[in-house]
Amino acid sequence: GDLIHSGVCGPLNVPTPKGHRYFVIFKDDSSNYTVAKLTKAKNEAGSHFIEFAEMLNTQTGRSVKMLRTDQVMTSLVVTLKNMQNAPD
């Protein structure tokens, strides 16, 4: 849980039957546990990261300390900033 690698891919030329045109991948560096999520838009990456981080914390008791991406994920940064400022 210390280091998570992530990337968003898309838009795909042909969407899925449910209209998904992107996918986002999260990989825990220490365990190699990897999750891929289909999304309809890039800005859904932030909410999928929160789900991944919460699941990782529940399963391992460890929290994410660093997120490494292959590109700028503006919506994810905004989501994380909002999480930091939210009351517990």
Image (cartoon, rainbow, N blue to C red):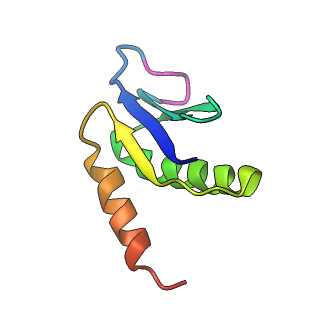
Residue at (30% x, 61% y) in the render: 78
Which percent across, then down, holds residue 72?
Answer: 24, 40
Q: Is residue 21 above or below residue 73?
A: above
Looking at this view, is 45 or 21 the one in front? 45
Tell me if residue 21 is in the magenta stretch: no
Q: Residue 83's quadrant in the figure? A: bottom left
- Counting from the top left corner in percent of width and height, residue 75 is at 31, 52
Quarter of the rendering occupied by the C terminus: bottom right
At a point 44% along the width and 21% down the height, the residue shown is: 15
- Is 16 in the magenta? yes
Residue 21 appears at what percent x and percent y? Answer: 41, 27
Magenta stretch, residue numbers: 15-19
Q: Nearer the viewer, residue 78 or 40?
A: 78
For residue 14, what is the image quadrant?
top left
Task: Please tell me which residue is depicted at 60% across the width and 33% down the height of the picture.
Answer: 35
Residue 53 relative to residue 82: left or right: right
The dominant secondary structure in magenta is loop
Left or right, residue 72 beside residue 36: left
